Image (cartoon, rainbow, N blue to C red):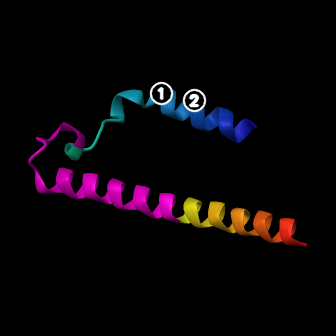
């Protein structure tokens, strides 16, 4: 708990040193911004695929339990 307090205190003291990266301030046509957007879309697709596989697994278990 005390470590959390020190971390919050450190961030509060040095708040003027914390800034967003240059990609956040860049234009939407910059290659780094496009790459970050494509990375987010790709990871969203991976997460949706894994969740849909999990839902399909639960559905199959439900169907097999009804047959028994």
Residue at position x 11%, y 41% in the image: 27
Whether the residues at callouts 2 and 1 have beta carbons within 8 Å, the answer is yes
Q: Quadrant of the C terminus?
A: bottom right
Looking at the rendered structure, the secondary structure element under dot 1 is helix
- Estimate the spatial distance between the alpha carbons at disc 2 and disc 1, rounded to whole Å: 6 Å
Q: Is residue 46 magenta?
A: yes
Res. 61 image quadrant: bottom right
Which residue is at the front of the view, 55 or 37?
Answer: 55
Residue at position x 26%, y 57% in the image: 38
Give the side of residue 20 with respect to residue 31, left or right.
right
Outermost front residue: 67
- The number of discs equals 2
Would you name the residue on which mark 1 appears? 13
Give the side of residue 29 with respect to residue 21, left or right.
left
Give the side of residue 1 with respect to residue 48, left or right.
right
Numbered badge on residue 9: 2
Give the residues drawn in magenta, as a range: 24-49
Position of residue 45 measured from the top left corner of the image (x, y, whole percent): 41, 60
Residue at position x 13%, y 43% in the image: 28
Which residue is at the front of the view, 39 or 66?
Answer: 66
Q: Is residue 60 above or below residue 9?
A: below
């Amino acid at each position: 708990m005390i470590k959390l307090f020190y971390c919050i205190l450190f961030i509060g003291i040095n708040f003027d040193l914390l800034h967003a990266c240059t990609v956040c301030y860049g234009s939407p046509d910059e290659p780094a911004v496009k790459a970050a957007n494509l990375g987010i879309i790709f990871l969203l697709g991976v997460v949706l695929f894994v969740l849909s596989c999990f839902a399909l697994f639960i559905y199959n278990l439900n169907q097999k339990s009804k047959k028994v």
